[in-house]
Image (cartoon, grey):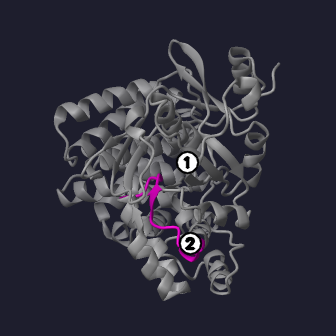
Amino acid sequence: MRRLTRAEAGAGDASPVRVVHLGLGAFFRAHQAWYTHRANTADPTGEPAGIVAFTGRRPDAARPLADQDGLYHLLVRDRDGDRTELVTSLSGAYDGADAKRRDGALADPAVSTVTLTITEAGYLRAADGAPDLADPRLAGDLERLRAGDSAVSTAPGRLLAGLAARRAADAGPLAVVPCDNLVDNGATVARVLTGVAEAVDDGLAAWVRANVSFVSNTVDRITPATTPGDREVVASLSGFADQAPVVTEPFTEWVLAGDFPAGRPAWEHAGARFVDDVRPFEQRKLWLLNGAHSLLAYAGPTRGHETVAEAIADPVCRGWVDAWWDAAARHLALDAADIAKYRDDLVERFANPRIRHALAQIAMDGSQKLPIRVLPVLTRERADGVLPEGGVVALAGWLAHLRDGTRVRDPRGEELLGLADGPVDDVVPRVLAVLDPALADDAELLAGVREKLTELAR
């Protein structure tokens, strides 16, 4: 079996670095890195864009990629079988704690764009959306940044340290593209970053406002965790001993709205869409795909299911999802034909038997995800006097997940496990109040969630 290197694969030299990425995970490699790779190969006469990527919560993620000169395969799975695609856009992969290298990359005037995949929880926001300056991790980073020490640990701290280095180098403007499931993610991250900058240095905050654009976008590609068996399939199909392949589906979408003051890769050559307003597409994805995913992640296991494909094949779960989609569709600013096609596509994607998308993986960080995936539709329905079945199932399923307690991975996990312990009548209002205090005052909703939670428990 051949070792995967640029020389062995005939991939040529690494492209000049034009993009910095924070959060070196599987989704980034199936999505943003793939779009950059495809953009580079679509126009061989143009200037290629390389990416230097830094790890977030898993520093070891960089090692196999560094050993492979940044190369890796996508294992694309659909009903007809598997295929591999070699991705060549990654020019470097490093531990995010390597402050010197990270700051140097962000201070390079050739770099035009920063992309982020750090999860919803990684932005360390308070309830009002501002940065949670009282969070001990962020507070520690603030002390170091004020002292001129860039050995910081949080994603906002690392990005700001790099931007401070860029300011000091007079390296010019750039765009930040946060590719996480946040409502109006460009403006949301702008608020976090400028808030952290203000807490460090007013001059730095002013520089960020004048020189950094924040691009709102919505991303879509199902990317389950890679297994040892997946690595064996990649080896068999490609002939390479790839230690860092990524499994994904054929479908992919990227819709962006915003300015790129220093230029960007030609992602449109790979199918990305640039629009004036990303919000309708963002809501469609968050409410229909992500909302249904969360519903299945919490309620599906109560019926014995472990994957999305298993759950969507269950007529009861499918009925819950259809009810949720019916409710969400009433509040989407897109035409009915677009919504119907997206729903049909989702059923096909969810049912793909070759994508083992674990419900436990989706269930992570529910306290961060439910407020943007489920509550917007739920609150609109309640304002119209409707008690949406799908929304009730999603909330009851989350409560069942917390009360089971064996698979809870959430930044507020310890708090939530305590709140979820006790009689159902007491648990429902105090847990839902974590998501939104107004939910605890909605008697009809509380009754519906209590009834459904009891049903799921049986």
**Image coords of residue 424 (percent x, y):** 49, 60
Which one is nearer the viewer's eye here, 115 or 423? 115
In the picture, the disc for residue 363 is 1
Q: SS for tag 2?
A: helix
Which one is nearer the viewer's eye here, 254 or 315? 254
Which one is nearer the viewer's eye here, 329 or 185? 185
Say whether residue 48 is visible.
yes
Residue 169 painted magenta: yes
Q: Is residue 126 left or right of residue 330?
A: right
Q: Which region shows up in magenta?
A: 163-183
Q: CA distance from mark 1 to mark 2?
A: 30 Å
For the residue marked with disc 1, what is the amino acid? Ala
**Image coords of residue 35 (percent x, y):** 48, 37
Q: SS for tag 1?
A: loop
Q: Could you tell me how many numbered marks the image carries? A: 2
The N terminus lies in quadrant = top right
Mark 1 Cα within 10 Å, few/some/many (few <14, many 20+)?
many
**Image coords of residue 53 (percent x, y):** 63, 51
The single residue placed furthest to the front in the displayed view is 45
